[in-house]
Image (cartoon, rainbow, N blue to C red):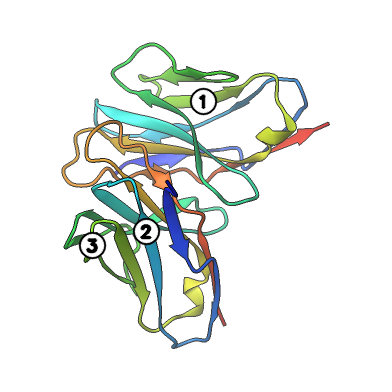
Amino acid sequence: NAGVTQTPKFRVLKTGQSMTLLCAQDMNHEYMYWYRQDPGMGLRLIHYSVGEGTTAKGEVPDGYNVSRLKKQNFLLGLESAAPSQTSVYFCASSRFRGSGEQYFGPGTRLTVT
Amino acid sequence: AQTVTQSQPEMSVQEAETVTLSCTYDTSESDYYLFWYKQPPSRQMILVIRQEAYKQQNATENRFSVNFQKAAKSFSLKISDSQLGDAAMYFCAYRSAISLGAQKLVFGQGTRLTINP
């Protein structure tokens, strides 16, 4: 049982390049989330999904797209990376019922130059 | 919209002593959950403790306990007998219990805790 995994762990992009971050969970959770963490700002929600085939915007969605084609996977895409997207990205998942405890992946450190 | 505020960017404590981290939140809802997450240097977010707003009893998990003051909208974390492994960034988080859709968390800015040997 690996929990929540993220690929890659580190990445450096040049401005304008694109990339996709992959999140996978093996806990059969219905809900999945993408957050970004910046110094002094805590974690902010980018996009989330309440089930396979559904996605919704969070607090800071601009410049990102997501897809959830399979229940266990949640992809975060950057179509044209900008230096402002330099951050640490976390994926999380949670069950439909209960307190909504979220289980987090190890994070991806992305630098855009 | 709900907000969570951690007014202490940094705290330090001597090993084996007790430290309290502060958290306040703003909401008009009556039913919600509150969490404390720990983020050590490894970056992994780890749930420390949770509190359901409808419960008057403060949650405890071994050396970790909370002081939940619903009327004051305050949710502090007390760490007893501090250990070197407790050194980390600590985040307070709020989740509505009645919102439709996903169980989104709203995080505070974090408090960096240093343990002095």
Q: Residue at x 42, y 39 (%)?
A: B4
The residue beneath circle 3 is: A70
Determine whether, in the image, residue A93 is placed left or right of residue B83: left
Q: Residue at x 45, y 61 (%)?
A: A6
Q: Residue at x 18, y 46 (%)?
A: B101
- Secondary structure, mark 3, is loop
The residue beneath circle 1 is: B76
Q: Residue at x 44, y 25 (%)?
A: B74
In-front residue for pair B66/A74: A74
Do the residues marked 1 and 3 share a common chain? Answer: no
Question: Considering only vertical position in the picture, is B31 above or below B102?
Answer: above
Q: Are marks 2 and 3 in contact (CB under 8 Å)?
A: no
Residue type, label 2? Ala
The residue beneath circle 2 is: A24
- Secondary structure, mark 2, is strand
Q: Alpha-carbon neighbours of circle 3 within 10 Å: few (<14), some, or many (≥20)?
A: few
Distance (Cα) linking label 2 and label 3: 10 Å
In-front residue for pair A105/A28: A28
**Label 2: chain letter:** A
Residue type, label 1? Ser
Distance (Cα) linking label 2 and label 1: 33 Å
Where residue B99 sits in the image (x, y, percent)? 19, 40
Distance (Cα) linking label 1 and label 3: 39 Å
